[in-house]
Amino acid sequence: MTLAADRGHATTDGHATRDTVVDPLRFHGDAEVAPGLIDAAVNVRLAAPPAWLHAVLAASLDDLGRYPDAARARAAVARRHRCDASEVLVTAGAAEAFVLVARALRPRLAAVIHPSFTEPEAVLRAAGHPVERVTLDAATGFVLDPARVPPEADLVVLGNPTNPTSVLHPAATIAALARPGRVLVVDEAFADVVPGERESLAASVAAGDLPGLIVVRSLTKTWALAGLRVGYLLADASTVGLLATAQPAWSVSTPALVAAEACCTPAAVAEADRAAADLVGIRNRFAERLALVPGLRLVPNPAASFLLVQVPGGAAVRLALREAGIAVRRGDTFPGLGPDWLRVTVRDDEVNQQVARTFADVTRRLRAGP
C-alpha cells in the first residue's frame, strides 16, 4: 500500500523519504527527520542522555567482554514498581515487548485500539494472528469506550497516554477491559511524561488485581536512549516466564541493562517527574499558540509530550512546514486518521514559538493560493 506517493522514494525497511510510504504500520516519526530540520516529529525529550547517564553508559563499556546479565536491571525495575523481579522482563525497547507478545501468545482474536502506536498491530499480523481494529472517534476526543471492544477478543492492546492522540485514559476505564481468559496489553511508553504517572496500571501488576495484565514501558523517550533500545514489561510471573521463552538470548545489551538500572533509581524517577511537571506548562503554552492558527483544531486535554492537530490541507501544510525547515509527523499512517492530521512534538518554549509561528505563516500562505 502506498500513500501520497507524489514525492520521494521508499526505503527497504518500510520507512520512507519525503512522501512515499510502503507500509503505513511500519512508518514512524524518525522517517520525517533530516539534517537541518527542526525535529517536531520524534517524541524523544532530549538530544542526548543527561551527563550523569552518559557517564554511567561510558563506564559500562568496560564490561562488554562479558555476556549481559539482566538480574540487576530486573531487580531495579522491581524496586521501582514495588513488584517482584519475577514480574519483570527487560526488553530491547518497548518494540521488542510487542514482538514477544506476538511470538509467545496464540490469541483467537486480537483487538487493537486505534489511533495508536502501530507496531503492536504490525507484529501481530506478521505472526499470523487475526486482528480487529477498534477505532476511536475524533468527535469524542478519542475517548475510550470499553463497550466497543469485541467481547470475544482474548488479546486487547492500547496505549496510555496514547500515541499519537496524547489522550490519557482513566485507569478505571482501561481496567474494565480486563477479564479472565483475556490478555490486556497497555503500552505505557509515555507514562513517565505524566506527573505522578497518574492513570498508570503498573501498580496493578504487584497487586495482582487485574487478570492477564501486561504493562509495557520504554526508557527511550525521557532519557534520550532511542538508539540504545531499552524498555521493560511488567506482568505476573507465569506470563513473564512465557514471554521470556520467546526472547532471543542476550537480546538486551549490557549498556542497555545498566541504563535500565540507573533510570529506575529514586533520584532518576524524581528527575523524570520534575521534567513531566515542567512539560505541563510548556505544552499548555504551545497548545495556546497553535490554537490561534486559523482552521487548526487540537485534540483536547493532551497529556503527553506531543499534540495531535487537524488542519485543512494537512498534507500540503506538512510539506510546506518541511520546506520552511520544520519536520512534523504525518497522521495518515495511523489507522483512523487521514492526511489532515499531524502530530507535533512539544519542545522548549523558544522552539515551540517558532513552530507555531511557522504553522500560521504556512497556513496563511496556502489559503491565499498562488
Image (tube, rainbow, N blue to C red):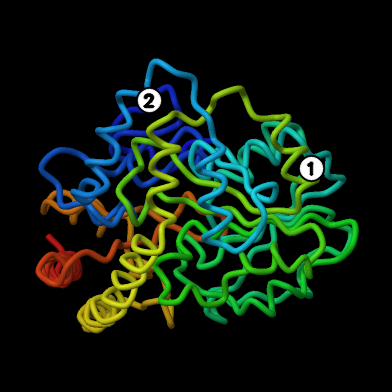
- What residue is drawn where x is 33% and y is 70%? 311
Disc 1 secondary structure class: loop
The residue lying toward the viewer, choosing from 90 and 152, is 90
- Callout 2 environment at 10 Å: few (<14), some (14 to 19), or many (20+)? few
Please give the count of numbered marks on the rendered protein. 2
Q: Is residue 157 left or right of residue 229?
A: right
State whether residue 318 is above or below residue 355. Answer: above
Disc 2 secondary structure class: loop
- Callout 1 environment at 10 Å: few (<14), some (14 to 19), or many (20+)? some
Looking at the image, is mark 1 or mark 2 earlier in the sequence?
2
- What residue is drawn where x is 30% and y is 23%? 62
- What residue is drawn where x is 41% and y is 76%? 195
Q: Quadrant of residue 30?
A: top left
Q: Quadrant of residue 251?
A: top right
Q: Position of residue 6 (x, y in %)?
A: 32, 38
Q: Position of residue 22 (x, y in %)?
A: 47, 32
Report the disc number at residue 130: 1
The amino acid pointed to by label 2 is Thr
Q: CA distance from mark 1 to mark 2?
A: 27 Å
Taking the view exactly as shown, the residue that stands out farthest to the top is 65
Q: Position of residue 298 (x, y in %)?
A: 37, 77
State whether residue 252 is above or below residue 293. Answer: above
The residue lying toward the viewer, choosing from 361 and 44, is 44
The amino acid pointed to by label 1 is Pro
Can you identify the residue that label 2 sits on? 11
